[in-house]
Each structure stands twice: as C-alpha cells, then as structure tokens.
Image (tube, grey):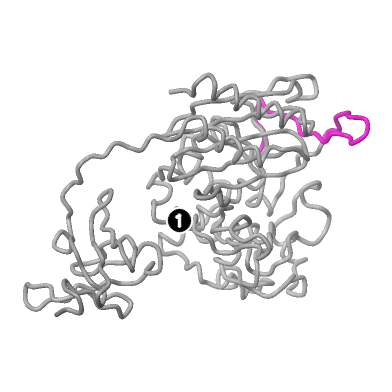
Amino acid sequence: MSVRADTAAALYAEVAAAQGDTKLPSVNAGLVRDGALVWTAARGRFATADGGLPGSDVQYRIGSITKTMTGILILQCRDDGLLSLNDAVGKHLPGIAFGDRTIRQLLAHSGGMNAEPEGPWWERNPGVTFDELTAAMDDSQAVGPVDRRHHYSNLGYGLLGEIVARLRGTSWLELTQERILDPLEMRRTSYFPEGPAADGFSVHPFSGQLDPEPAYDSGAMAPAGQLWSTIEDLARYATFWIDPVPEVLSRESVEEMAASVASDPREGLNASYGLGLRLIADDPHLLIGHTGSMPGFLAGLFVDRVRRVGAVTLGNATYGRVASLAPDLVRILTRYEPPIMQEWVPEPPLAQGAELLGHWYWGNTPLTISVCAGILQLSGGLTTRLSPLAPDLYQGRDGYLSGEKLHVIRDGDTITHLTVATFVLTRTPYGS
C-alpha cells in the first residue's frame, strides 16, 4: 500500500526543500507504515563524485544509528542473564577508567563521561585498538557528576561494544551481524561500503564546491558509528522498533529502551534519551529513534510506535537537514493521512487473571481491571499493565507501578484483596 498522490507531493516537496535549502549533494528518504515501506524519494545528482544518482538501495554511512544496535546487544546480554544494567563498567572491563559508571549510565549518556576519546579526531583518522583507546582514558576527563544531566558520549559506546564482545566471546561486528542484521534480513547493512555506495562530501561555504570527506575504519569506536546502510534496510529496522522481533529483542525490552532516562534540563523531553534511543516529544505523540553523523554523511530514523509509522533519511553531506527531516516527514504523513485505528476484535481467553477482572477500590477510589490486547490493564487512580509472574503474582509494566509486584491474597479459594506497593485493593470501598 502506497501513500496518496497529494501526500506524496507534499512529502517530496519537503525532501526537495531540505536538499536545496541546506545544499545536500544527495538525499534519500523513506516512510514505513504498518510494517511496510510505503514511500521513497531521492533528490540530488551527486551521490558520488562522478554524478551517481541516489536511490533506496544505495548505501550511506548511518553514523550514530549504529548506537541503537549496540544498545540492543547490551539488552540481549541483560535478558540472557549475562549482565545487569546496574553493573559497574569495571566489573566487565577491569581496571578501566570510569569503571564505577554503570552500563545504564553509558547507554543513556548520563555517566558524566567526556564526549570523545583522547587523541586525534577519531571520525577523521584511522581508528585505534581497544587497548590504545583505553590507555588514553583518565577519570579526570569527566565533564560532571553521574546522573546530573545528559551529556552525549561517543566514548561510552566504545566501551559498551567491548563489553558485549567479551561476554559473548566474539567481536561486536559478528554479534551485530548474527543477532540483529541477519534476523531482520538487513542484507545491505555492512561495516564497510559495499557498492552501490555514496561518497561522503562537505560543501565549501563560499565556493559551493564539493570537498571529499574520509571514511576510515573506526576501530574500537565502531560501536558508536561505523555502519553503512540503505533506505530499504533502515525501513526494515524502523519496522522492528514498531513490531519487535522476539528473536532480536522482546517487546518489553524495546519499551524499556524507549523510556526516558536522561535529558538536557534546558529542553526537557525534547532532548531526552532512553537506553540507546533518542526521544522526541511531538505532543501528544512520542517519536523514538536516532540521528547519525559521520564526516560526509548524515542520517535519521524515527518512529511513532503508537501510530505505527516511521521515517528514515540518508544524505551525503557533513551539514544539512537530513536527521531532522525524518520527524518532519512523519508529521506530514500523519497530517495528510491520519492513521486508521486498528480494527477491534474480541479478546482471546486469558491464561491467567480472568477472576481479577472488574471493579476494585483503593480506599474509596474506584479502579478497574480489564483486558486490552491480551494484557491485564489496571486503570483509575493507579494505572499500569500487569504481566503474570507466577500464580497469584503479577508485575506492573509501566506508570507509577512499573516493576512493582501485585499479590493476590486469598482465603481458601476466595480472593479477599490485592496488594501492590503497600496499596490494598478491595472489591468494595474500604473493603466494607
């Protein structure tokens, strides 16, 4: 299913404006909706120095969108019991500087670490080994205390990549290939460019001429921004964030990554970060994804998981409106073609919890337990979704009660009340 003609015209006009206004040698864009790539467009005639044309199967460097994959690898390790997000980095990388920072803090850029490794600018020079990277690290390079604010740190993701490699006994690249790219059938995403691929450029500010940019192997910093990809592959990846593939990561873990952890206090949620994901408040909606930037290349990937739409953008310039173009395209699509609410179908029988359905009271505050999409939903003064953990035991999935245990208390076979986080829920006000 494609977009309507008037929608396509508005979308293409936005892409053309971004290419012309910010002097992009080439730019590609794509939109996903309900699991499918429904629209693509390209603009500009200089994907390569000799006038190669852009297209949805042409590779561009995706920069820090790579970080989202490193984040997935970390969550996979957590879900397999290999680490805790609250582990100190030094537990897995003994003797390293910043070893007291936690894995969670590195994922959210809240560990107060410096943004870049010491030494020559890693993006424009050949990468170094992990030992060379860490030999130049020093706790005195910290930019502030932990958990005070969001401070973006590429360096932190170099460390995260090494952690997963040591835990799994193979390289970060092999893990990315085997545990993310292969299951999602992202066959045109690679460590080095595999033609057709774009050339990276910067545009001279006065002459308007194209200056070639280098594309080095990032070495130990690869987990922060090395990969190349295409619009078609990134569309598959965007769809994963809307409909998680359990072989890669569970829906619950994706939701955890997409929850705000750190933000810039000057901008609040508009500059918020989860666990490896950027969050953009688009009132009343939330976009999740990431931007990307490497010398000569820019990228963007953002999805609205509720409205089941997303956009991906790729360009070959060091500066220009590419990353921010992705959220703009989502807004245009949903303005011209508002998402149709999914068809309601009857709920399947619950494996556990049917006897909890109905009205409850916290004191005299009315609450309700119902079913939505096969999941128990507690609504009212206390609101959360509930996952069964064991007979008569549930856990809150979100909201104030996220992570809290709800216990079903019985007198024989009869339920007398529920308890959660010291709250007592009864079938009548005050249990009278």
Q: Amino acid at mark 1?
A: Gln
Direction from residue 316 to residue 164 in the image, left or right:
left
* Residue 146 seen: yes
Q: State which region is magenta.
A: 192-212
Q: Position of residue 417 (x, y in %)?
A: 18, 75
In this rendering, the answer to whether 184 lies above or below 125 is: above
Q: How many marks?
A: 1
- Residue 210 falls within the magenta-colored stretch: yes
What secondary structure do most residues of the magenta stretch adopt? loop
In this rendering, the answer to whether 45 lies above or below 348 is: above
The quarter of the picture where the N terminus appears is top left
Q: Residue at x 51, y 58 (%)?
A: 74
- Residue 263 falls within the magenta-colored stretch: no
In this rendering, the answer to whether 54 lies above or below 258 is: above
Direction from residue 190 to residue 74 in the image, left or right:
left
Name of the residue lying farthest toward the right? 206
Direction from residue 429 to residue 172 in the image, left or right:
right
Q: Residue at x 52, y 71 (%)?
A: 87
Q: Position of residue 335 (x, y in %)?
A: 52, 34
Determine which quarter of the picture holds residue 188: top right
Q: Residue at x 27, y 54 (%)?
A: 375
The residue singled out by tag 1 in the image is 76
